[in-house]
Image (cartoon, grey):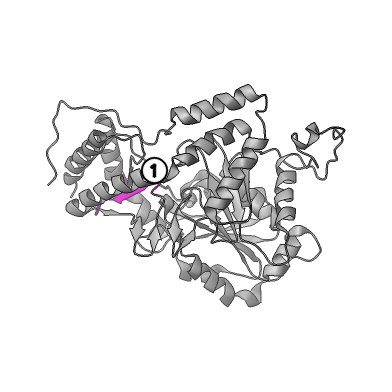
Amino acid sequence: MIKKCSEKEIRNIPFSPPDISDSEIEEVIQTLKSGWITTGPKTKELEKILANFCNTSKTVCLNSATACEELNLKICGIGPGDEVIVPAYTYTATASAVIHCGARIIFVDNKKDSTEMDYSKLEEVITKNTKAIVAVDIGGVIADYDKIYSIVEKKKHLFKAKEGNSLGARIQQKLNRILVFADAAHSLGAIKEGKKSGSIADFTSFSFHAVKNFTTAEGGASTWKDIEGIDNEELYNQYQLYSLHGQSKDALTKTQIGAWEYDIIGAWYKCNMTDIMASLGIRQFDRYSELLEKRNNIISKYDNMCDELGVTYLKHYTCNSQSSGHLYLTRIPNINEKQRNEIIIKLAEKGISTNVHYKPLPMMSAYKNMGWDIKNFPNAFDYYKNLVSLPLHTKLSDKDIEYVILNFSEIVKEYL
C-alpha cells in the first residue's frame, strides 16, 4: 500500500550521481604519484579485466563511447556511400558517429510500446548500400540481436563487401554480410540467453561516463567477437593507431631503451584513455557486482509501485535475460507532453530530479535539418511523449527510494 507523503518532508534526490568510494580515490592518488598518468599500464590492466568480464578475446579502452562507436565503424571500412541503420529512439551519439564516418544514417521507428526498433521496418529499409545496423541497449536491456542477425542473413544477397586488402575490406569480406553493432552504452554486465553484453554483436561500444553504472569519469570501451581469418592483435593495433594520431608507438613503448623513434601511419585522431581514468575503473570494477545487485533491488521496488498505480515501465528482468539496470523508464497512461512536463516540474519541486530518455532524434534540430520528420516515427514519439525516467543509482538510501515512491505516486494519481 502506497502511503501519503508528509508535506514537511523535503529531500534532495539527484538523478544520477557517480558512486565513488575511498578505494577508487586511493587508486587514483597512487596513479598520480606514480609519475605515469596518460595511457599506460593501468589502461592495459582495465582492458584485460573488461575482456575477461565480457568473455571476449580483446577490449580497447578509449576516451568515450562515441569514439568507440566511430572507431568500430571506421575499422570495419564504413564510409561515404554506405548506409547505416540506426534507431530513431536513442541519444545523438549513436547517429553522430555514423555522420563522422561520412556514411548516411537511415532511421527506423520503434516497435509499438517498446524501446526496441521495429524489426519489420528494419528489414524493409535494407538496401544494397546498407553496410551496418546499430542496435541500442536502452536502459541496460539487451536488444534482440538474434532477430537482427536473422534479418541480416535473409538480406545477405544484397551485401557487397568493400574491395581491396585494407583491414575494413577484409572484415567485410570475411563476414560477407551486413555488420551488426551494439550501442551498449547502458548495458555493461547485462546478460541475454547466457551471453554477456559485449560478446553478442560483431562490435560493441560501452560508455563509462559519470552517469553510467560503471564509470571512469569519461571514457568507454570497444569489444568485438572473433572473426575467422582476422588477427585480433591487428584489430587492437588499429584501434591504437586511430586513437593516438596514427603514431606507431605509444608513450609507454617509447620509454624502452633506444625506442624513441616512431612513424605516423595515418593522420588520425586523439581519443585514448588515460591511466587516471583507468585506475578509477579498476577499483570501481571490484564493486561492480554489488552495484548491479543494488540497482536490481531498487528496480524491484519501483516495479511494485508501478504495478499498483497502473503505470507501465521498462522490463529489466525476464526468464532469459538480465539487464544492467541503468535507467528506470515509466510511462504514465493517457497523458500528453505538456502533462508529462508538469509531472517533472512537480517532482522537482519535491526535490526529485527526473529525466526523459529519449527525445527521438528526428525531433532534434540537427536531424530535422537533414530532412528527418518525427511524423514518420509515430511509435518513437508515442513512447517519448508520456515518459518520465526516475532516479536510479546506488547512492539512493532506503528513505530516498521510499520518498521517490510516495511523491511519484501522489503526483501521478492526479493524472490517472
Name the residue located 22 percent from the left edge and 35 percent from the top edge. 403
Residue extending furthest top?
33
Q: Mark 1 points at which residue?
A: 290
Q: Along the line of sight, which residue is nearer the eye, 245 or 96?
A: 245
Going by the numbered disc 1, the residue's amino acid type is Glu
The vertical placement of 388 against 260, above or below, is below
Q: Does the magenta stretch include residue 77?
A: no
Left or right, residue 352 beside residue 384 = left
Residue 130 percent location from the top left of the image = 63, 65
Name the residue located 39 percent from the left edge and 61 percent from the top edge. 321
Q: Does the magenta stretch include residue 335?
A: yes
Left or right, residue 350 beside residue 55 = left
Asked whether residue 183 is in view, the answer is no
Q: Along the line of sight, which residue is nearer the eye, 165 or 255?
A: 255
Residue 78 percent location from the top left of the image = 68, 57
Residue 350 percent location from the top left of the image = 24, 31
Name the residue located 31 percent from the left edge and 32 percent from the top edge. 13
Q: Main secondary structure of the magenta part?
A: loop
- SS at mark 1? helix
The vertical placement of 194 against 40, above or below, is below
Question: How many numbered tags mark residues here?
Answer: 1
The stretch in magenta equals 325-337
Asked whether residue 326 is in view, the answer is yes
Density class for disc 1 (Cα within 10 Å; few <14, some 14-19, many ≥20) is few
